Image (spheres, helix red, strand yellow):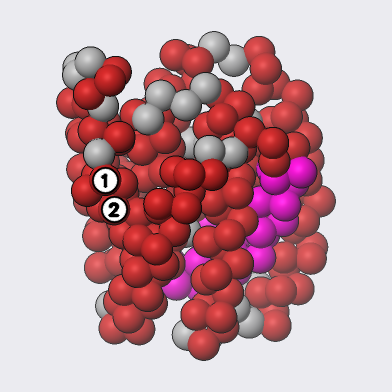
Amino acid sequence: MPSLDAVQWVILLAALFLVGFSKTGVSGAGTVAIALFALVLPTKQSTGTLLPLLLVGDLVAVASYRRHADWPRLIRLFPWVALGVVAGAVVVRWVDDAQMRRLIGAILLVIIAVHLWNRRRAPQDSLAHRRPVAALAGVFAGFATMTANAAGPIMAVYLLAAGLPMLGFLGTSAWFFLTINAFKVPFSVALGLITPSGLVFAALGTPAVLAGAAIGRAVISRIDRTLFEWITLGLTLLAAVRLLL
């Protein structure tokens, strides 16, 4: 890890708190965490440093919501997500930080636009129920998570469009990200994104992630689904604009 001043440490700790909060509370907070990490660390370095801490949050989320997953939907998504991860690993090897940020920001804006258009359709005609849309969402999510840990907004929009109840949304997300983040580890090690110093930082930052997860678990039952959806979309939009700029 590079030497950090007090302000940078505060930013990173706030980001880690939001990582935990996004895993058990409002998922859109995770995109803000990614943007905060990118303020302090280069995009590629922040991606590898954040991955072990995301896995900590994933374990807490699975422990909290493991009984609420939509497994048929997950099984349909996994092959496409794996394809996206492989494609993302190839891109990480060749693009620079600025190109990666703009690419992910553009993907997020497209996903938001598709979801807002999809809200105008009848629930039984939701695009999320169509196999080609699931395949596209899976590939985009795999690509985004490998390049910038930014699959959260894509999956949030996809699962919201699928009409899952809040606990179903959280349980499906928990198992999805635990599986996919674990799948990414060998690729991240091979690309040099996960380093010994990054693992030391992960050990130091774990308490902040756990604190965020505890708060998220405490408040999620008090959040209205409509409010939950708009907060998620709003935070996703902010993160997309931050990545593009």
Where 88 sits versus 220, above or below? below
To which quarter of the image does residue 223 belong?
top right
Q: Secondary structure at mark 1?
A: helix
Q: Residue at 79% of width from left, 63% of height from top?
A: 204
Residue drawn at the location 25% of the way across and 39% of the way down:
130
Percent position of residue 151, x then y: 42, 52
Q: Position of residue 87 (x, y in %)?
A: 31, 73
Pointer 1 residue: 131
Q: Position of residue 229 (x, y in %)?
A: 43, 23
Q: Is residue 202 left or right of residue 161?
A: right
Residue 69 disc label: none
Asked whether, in this view, residue 171 is left or right of residue 192, the answer is right
Instruction: Tell me whether the residue at label 1 lies in contact with that at label 2, contact meaning CB atoms closer than 8 angstroms.
Output: yes
Query: Disc 2 marks which residue?
Result: 135
Residue 153 sits in quarter: top left
Q: Which residues are magenta?
A: 36-63
Q: Amino acid at mark 2?
A: Ala
Query: Which residue is at 70% across, 45% downward?
Result: 62
Instruction: Give the prevailing secondary structure in the magenta stretch.
Output: helix
